[in-house]
Amino acid sequence: MRLILIANIIICICAFIGFTYGMIKFFKPKKAVYAQMIALAVGCVAFGRLYQVVRLVTGGDMFNGFQLGVFGVIGSLLFLFSANFGAMDSLADDGSKKFIKYRIIAFAAPVAALILYTLFIFFTDLPRSVKVASALVTVFVMQASYFHLKHLIFPDVDFGVIKCLKPYNLLALIYTFLCLAEMIVIGLGNEIGILIAGVLIGAVQIGVVISVEKGMKKWIT
């Protein structure tokens, strides 16, 4: 069994565990939509990886061209971005000048993501379809990582909502860059790197759900 298949099985199992746990804990009356969106992000990972496991088992290849499992990654990043964008971000940032330094510093995450894509994917001899798919993922990594870094460094506000969710935002930020790291090692055909990335991504899928649950409990109490 190839290491890339093992990596996807690990991620798939961990994501389904995290998704199931999130469904049980968060999808109840009067539960915060924020937590539900995190659970749905993990669900996107779970079903995306299930597709990739089936593709690999049936003889498909993840190294050449676009494959539908990428939508699982994009979907997860969209949910992570949507959860932080808007209402949650407005709880912390009122748009005043006193917080401008945090907005500027937070751009370090999307800039770093763009640099990694440019150096390790765009300026390589990878197929054009792989570059395009990776570019799509990178765009959503840039959007999600901006808010995760911003909320990670932002000073706390009333009710401690920002402080309570810092562990979650750290794990989610790590996940966004693990998505990039996985694309890079897949492009390089480095199966050991793919396995390491897979183990880390799998662990994060469980970690983000647990950290959100703990954070929301502290916020409410």
Image: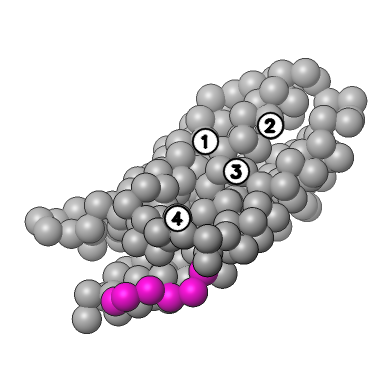
Residue depicted at 58% across the width and 51% down the height: 145
- For mark 4, what is the residue? 95
Which is closer to the viewer, label 4 or label 1?
Answer: 4
- Estimate the spatial distance between the alpha carbons at disc 3 and disc 2, rounded to whole Å: 10 Å
- Estimate the spatial distance between the alpha carbons at disc 1 and disc 2, rounded to whole Å: 10 Å
- Estimate the spatial distance between the alpha carbons at disc 2 and disc 4, rounded to whole Å: 32 Å
Which is closer to the viewer, label 3 or label 2?
Answer: 3
Can residue 197 be seen here? The reply is: no
- From the image, which quarter does the C terminus lie in? bottom left
Q: Amino acid at mark 3?
A: Val
Please tell me whether residue 56 is drawn above or below residue 4 in the rendered image. above
Q: Is the magenta region chiefly helix, strand or loop?
A: loop
Q: Amino acid at mark 4?
A: Gly
Q: Earlier in the sequence, mark 2 or mark 4?
A: 4
* Magenta-colored span: 154-159
Q: Earlier in the sequence, mark 3 or mark 2?
A: 2
Figure colour scheme: one colour
- For mark 2, what is the residue? 134
Q: Earlier in the sequence, mark 3 or mark 4?
A: 4
Q: In the rendered image, which quarter is residue 17 located in?
A: bottom left
Q: Amino acid at mark 1?
A: Ile
Q: Earlier in the sequence, mark 1 or mark 2?
A: 1
